[in-house]
Image (tube, rainbow, N blue to C red):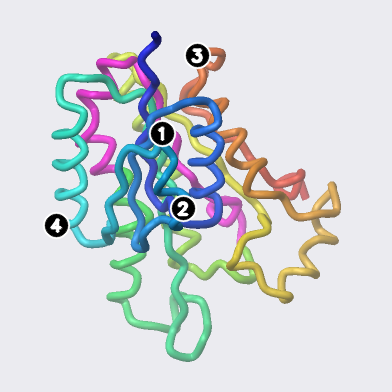
Amino acid sequence: MQTPRTLVLTGASRGIGHATVKRFAEQGWRLITCSREDIPKECRVDPNWAFHMPCDLSVPAERARFVDEVNARIGDGPLDALVNNAGVSPKTPYKERLGILHGEIDGWHRVFELNFYAPLELARGFAGALARAKGAIVNVTSIAGHRTHPFAGSAYSTSKAALSGLTREMAVEFAPLGVRVNAVAPGEIATEMISPDYEPLITRIPMHRMGTTAEVAAVIHRLCDPDFGYVTGSEIFVTGGQQLL
């Protein structure tokens, strides 16, 4: 019997992260995850979902605890894929997205701790296990990292732009380990965070609809597949063509 491949994914409890976990579970992967919230009750009975840790990856000590716990569970075994999905786009007390002129600078630090430093530190912390598998890393960036967005906010957008740059650098540094590093940049995806304010943006999308979390999950899954074994340092836009306009 073939040993199932192992996935570590952050931000697993909802949205793109939860859809991605479901996609990998359907393919028989062993799942190791974390998020600020616990996973839904119905997911706890999934035999593929081996371990979930509620934790806040914006806190350095929590990141270190997650890395240590996962490495202890993996032991000398391989890690086939790391998906850095967890992210945050906070609002100021005035309900505006955190920007340059509004909101506390400490808020910027918290955004970068989760959106940038967590992917960096998890990739470093799991490098050995990823190398043993000749595995893959996928960072979830955003269309907002490449163009201004009316609802993203400067802190979120620049953190995602930084993660895009980190993806390229990681691809070069991890290549000698046999580990591929790519990114997926979603556009307007129908999740719990979407409000009616987003409706006008649909007219700017060539496909004239929002994407689904399952469509993003499918791209993430394919980037972790051996069929994409010569693809590294790429960023795939899952935007319905929005980045072209």
Question: In the picture, residue 59 is in which quadrant?
Answer: bottom left
Q: Position of residue 197 (x, y in %)?
A: 72, 76
**Residue in front for this viewpoint, 51 or 92:** 51
Secondary structure at badge 3 equals helix
Q: Is residue 207 above or below residue 82?
A: below
Magenta segment, which residues?
120-148
On residue 226, which mark appears?
3
Query: Please, what is the three-letter code of the amino acid marked with disc 3?
Result: Pro
Q: Does residue 182 show up magenta in the picture? A: no
Q: Is residue 88 left or right of residue 109?
A: right
Q: Earlier in the sequence, mark 2 or mark 4?
A: 4
Q: Earlier in the sequence, mark 3 or mark 2?
A: 2
On residue 48, which mark appears?
1
Q: Does residue 128 show up magenta in the picture? A: yes
- Circle 2 or circle 4, nearest the eye: 4
Secondary structure at badge 2 equals helix
Residue at 44 percent across and 73 percent down: it is 90
Check disc 2: other Cα within 10 Å, few if <14, some if 14-19, many if 20+: many
